[in-house]
Image (spheres, helix red, strand yellow):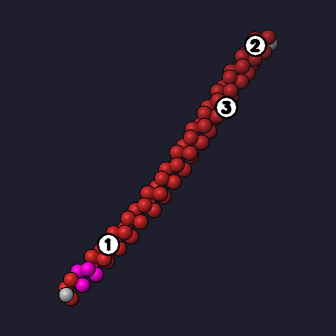
Amino acid sequence: MHNSEIRKAENDKLNMDVANISGYMKSIETLIGSMTKDINKNFVDLSDSIEDLKSGLNLVEQVSGRNLIDIAKLKAIK
């Protein structure tokens, strides 16, 4: 009788340990899911910022090109 009570207590402890580990795993999965959403959002925001920078750089290149043409015309007039 004593041995069966010990086995039952050990089994109950094992079941509690498994339940605790399962709870920790669910918490970790939730945290990873949240972090993944944040990473994806930041990636999209960063991609948008990079596209804005590219557009701005293209505009600077166009204006610079026009300025070079105007300078060349002014030099030719002299």
Q: Residue furthest top?
A: 77
Residue assigned mark 2: 73
Quadrant of the rendered structure where residue 4 is?
bottom left
| Looking at the image, residue 26 lies above or below residue 9 | above
The residues colored magenta run 5-9
Question: Which element carries disc 1, helix, strand or loop?
Answer: helix
**Magenta stretch contains residue 56:** no
Location of the C terminus (image quadrant) = top right
| Alpha carbons under labels 2 and 3: distance apart | 26 Å
Does the image show residue 7? yes
Q: Which mark is residue 56?
A: 3
Marking on residue 26: none
Q: Are marks 3 and 1 in contact (CB under 8 Å)?
A: no
Residue 34, percent from left and from top? 51, 54
Residue 15: give its label. 1
Name the residue type under label 3: Gly
Q: Earlier along the polypeptide chain: callout 1 or callout 2?
A: 1
Number of disc labels: 3
